Image (cartoon, rainbow, N blue to C red):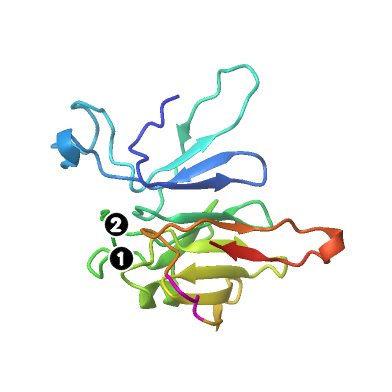
Amino acid sequence: MDAITNSFCAGGNVMGNGTWVNVGGNQAVTYGGAAAASQNGGGPYDDPDGRQSIRLLNPCDDGKCDWFLSPVSADQRWYPTVETLEDGSVIILGGCRNGGYVNSANQDNPTYEFFPPKGASITLSILQRTLPANLFPLTWLLPSGRLLIQSNWETVLYDYKKQKETPLDNIPDAVRVYPASAGTAMLPLTPANNWTATILFC
């Protein structure tokens, strides 16, 4: 399959209709990871700039499905998080504009947007406060419809419909987001636990 543009360091998830979505990535590069002379492809890897790409894949049973680009571009993002929402759309959070081991103020993208689009990108305060460790912010949709977002030491509940943050306790012991990249998971929501969300940070 051809990812079309450079998907290194992209974020992804599955939409409510089963479509795979992959957002952002890296600039076009040449040997040693240096920026390619052309950001439109060619050179040794033929990997056009993917930082604004939204790549989509509709799974199929005949082996003929492949990635295609959305006609709508994302804000420029490297290491964003993509979380599926209750209506089947996705929210795209954070990242930086050019890449690097940790983020920095001169390239931070502390915003979120939706796909399919629902307007311009919106600033998210927790991502502004948690430099430099705010890439791939850990995010889960909760049964309440709010998002649990964990970035650097901070944790908030975020009501994206009202654009309201509710602070929670800082995470203990160590930072879990990239580049620490700890294992995290939401345990199953079942009738037996009354659909109570429990999230593990390892």
- In this orientation, which residue lies closer to the viewer: 189 or 34? 189
Q: How many marks?
A: 2
Drawn side of residue 46 relative to residue 129, left or right:
left
x, y (%) of residue 12? 50, 46
Which quadrant holds the N terminus?
Answer: top left
Q: Which mark is residue 170?
A: none
Residue 93: in sight, yes or no? yes
Secondary structure mostly seen in the magenta stretch: loop
x, y (%) of residue 125? 43, 77
| Magenta stretch: includes residue 172 | yes
Drawn side of residue 166 relative to residue 79, left or right:
right
Marks 2 and 1: CB-CB under 8 Å?
Answer: yes
| Magenta stretch: includes residue 103 | no
Q: Which contiguous range is marked in magenta?
A: 170-174
x, y (%) of residue 33? 19, 40
According to the image, label 1 marks what residue? 108
Q: CA distance from mark 2 to mark 1?
A: 6 Å
What's the residue at 27%, 53% (across, down)?
A: 99
Q: Amino acid at mark 1?
A: Asp
Q: Which mark is residue 97?
A: 2
Point out the tag, 2 or 1, that comes first from the N-terminus. 2
x, y (%) of residue 148? 58, 69
Quarter-of-image position of residue 128: bottom left
From this view, report whether residue 14 is shown above or below residue 48: below
What's the residue at 20%, 26% (across, down)?
A: 44
